Image (cartoon, coloured by chain):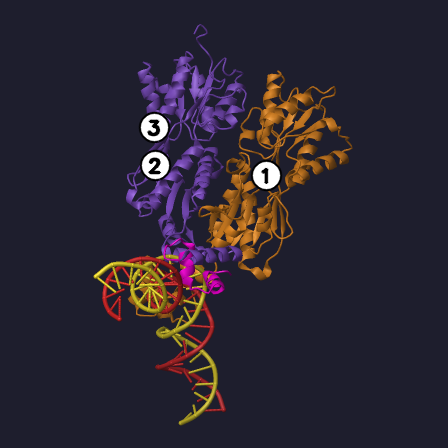
Chain colours: A purple, B orange, C yellow, D red
Amino acid sequence: MISIKTIAEKCNVSVATVSKALNGHNDIGDETRVRIKKAADELGYLPNAAARALKTNRTYSIGVLFEEEAGCGLTHEYFSGVLNGLKLEVEKNGYDILFISSNFENKKISYYEHCKYRNLDGIAIVCADYKNKQVHELMEGTIPVVTIDYVHYNCTAVCSNNIQGIEDLLRYIYSKGHRKIAYIHGQSNSYVTKERLASFYRTMDSLGIEVPDTYIETADYIETTKTAVCTKKLLELPDPPTCIIYPDDTALLGGMNVIKQLGLQIPKDISIAGYDGSKMSQLLYPTIATIKQDAQRIGTEAARRLICNIEKPKLALVERVIIEGMLLTGQSIANLEPNQ
Amino acid sequence: MISIKTIAEKCNVSVATVSKALNGHNDIGDETRVRIKKAADELGYLPNAAARALKTNRTYSIGVLFEEEAGCGLTHEYFSGVLNGLKLEVEKNGYDILFISSNFENKKISYYEHCKYRNLDGIAIVCADYKNKQVHELMEGTIPVVTIDYVHYNCTAVCSNNIQGIEDLLRYIYSKGHRKIAYIHGQSNSYVTKERLASFYRTMDSLGIEVPDTYIETADYIETTKTAVCTKKLLELPDPPTCIIYPDDTALLGGMNVIKQLGLQIPKDISIAGYDGSKMSQLLYPTIATIKQDAQRIGTEAARRLICNIEKPKLALVERVIIEGMLLTGQSIANLEPNQ
DNA sequence: TTACATTACTTAATCGTTTTCTTAAGTCAA
DNA sequence: TTGACTTAAGAAAACGATTAAGTAATGTAA
């Protein structure tokens, strides 16, 4: 293995000189520095990450927490988009990404312990169960953390603008003449759901529309069984809605199928909208009204803030970054006011 | 920081004794071992990964190559399924996953150099551009490698059974009475495509059906524009097919839309089939005939073989593992022989 | 009793870096 | 000439673990 020592011998200098030359210290003569750098190149020298980490307490690796509860996780287009953005930005800055697990040798340890053991420079929590105490231990520890779509007093957070997203979607639907709008929202305990639901009520309120309780249902994200049931229920109401908003584009499919099975047409008989702006939503027929979340950008931004907090601890800040989504109108919302 | 030294002082023994006690060497007395382990637990001791790696040349981390060329990559359900399986199995064995990039500090280095620098114990190539010389450098190096859906003389490979997959799909379509079957296949340079296409011709041959060249088209995976064009072209042939097989479930959507726009019904007027068995394919209306690839299992199996090769180099083997897919018949294939 | 094993430890070297403290040589002003 | 300063390099300790080699205390066989 080519080490600093090999170079030192070749150049007839000490290892200290080599180290300093390669790290750009200014107490090395120009001629010597050039000679050493040339030798390092020729020998194909690469520093040993472990040795460096041991000495400097910096690993240049970022831990990513990506828990997949209930089939969610890596296979979700939104989260993998975030991860992708994160990865690109982190790598651009010379860091690597390591997944945080709660295993160590044959036994279980906490996420935080795992991070300490691996000496991670920073942590990005992309997808996690925030009811898990271990996740809070992580956020309250001493390693810089950035959270995605979740706010904690001790961590920088990057969030999709769910409030604006729902408002935009709703105002668009309203502009097409809809007044009877139902909302099947996601699991009610999540941060994201709370924002979206509150924004739904606020926007409806500001539009002067009272929402009957029968128009609000709960279903899981991604899951289609429950949305199918809810859709049926909504359509069979004495005064059914003219438009249904789903938790996300995937969950929407459950409703879409029921609608087709009932022999109804979208958007002629019933309008529908999703959330996420998944690739698929724009490939369906008709294309779906939805809010495209800028997943990649959320990842990039999270990486940037995190690295900044790592490298300039004096300037470190607990920030709140909001990333705007974009309305995709699609063809799934009927125009109820042809005179407009 | 709690180190082996802290424990040694607390127990009045040398650091060597602590190290050996914790690592289960047998030249430590029972009473001492128990005392040391207890102290380690009480102090919340965790070994320093860097120090250990430096001394032992083992990092307990597995590099994953996951290149996203052209929007593919992490957001693809198949690949992220593989990654998920890989992650779970690797973690169960006390390893962590690190993404391999080609960055180091501010400059570019090769994947292989990156792996050497990080001292990775093994490498899983999940999604890569095999025309890239760097990928071959990786496969031909001295670090154990497992490849997914690609075979190289120097690496263990875990592949989805594409040959059987296409055969199963085709025989099912045949059994429903179809004889005029078109195949829009993926990019022709890939290993997977070659297998599928060959299997298509072989199966048709063994069924005694001659395939007109006009029934074979090329499109990209995931991409819908080209499949839309091809579908139109196929349907306008003087003697159009009764069934079209698409590169994958996503690319199929492009064709599906064209079909609907032409006012045709699936499967009454035209039958279609996909590949992958994506979640979405079974949520569409009608549900799609497709081959479900066992992505998670492919990941698990890859991890298992890789770790085996790492830990027992004497038994290390270049293996070829084939993972079977499963036919999902769906409702998208018309029954042309009602008497059957 | 001697010689040799066995047991249960300790000593010390080592992995590849970084960094503080020295040191030697050269420069320059008084 | 002397002392102070600057520059360019080296020596050595340190990071936290592992491990080969050494050592004392005990047991045991001839």
Describe the element under mark 2 as helix, strand or loop: strand
Q: x, y percentage for residue A225? A: 48, 28
Q: Mark 1 packing: few (<14 Cα in 10 Å), some, or many (20+)?
A: many
User: Vertical placement of B39 versus B161: above or below?
Assistant: below
Q: Residue at x 41, y 17 (%)?
A: A172
Chain letter for mark 2, please.
A
The quarter in which the N terminus of chain B is drawn is: bottom left
User: Vertical placement of A340 versus B91: above or below?
Assistant: above
According to the image, label 1 marks what residue?
Answer: B293
Q: In this image, C13 relative to B224: left or right?
A: left
The quarter in which the C terminus of chain B is drawn is: top right
Tell me the distance, in whole angstroms, between the alpha carbons under discs 2 and 3.
Answer: 15 Å
Describe the element under mark 3 as helix, strand or loop: helix
According to the image, label 3 marks what residue?
Answer: A195
Q: Nearer the viewer, mark 2 or mark 1?
A: 2
Residue type at mark 1 is Gln
Q: Mark 2 packing: few (<14 Cα in 10 Å), some, or many (20+)?
A: many
Q: Are marks 3 and 1 on the same chain?
A: no
**Region of the chain picked out in magenta, as a range:** A1-28
User: Vertical placement of A242 versus A159: above or below?
Assistant: above
User: Sequence order check: which comes first, mark 2 or mark 3?
Assistant: 2
Describe the element under mark 1 as helix, strand or loop: loop
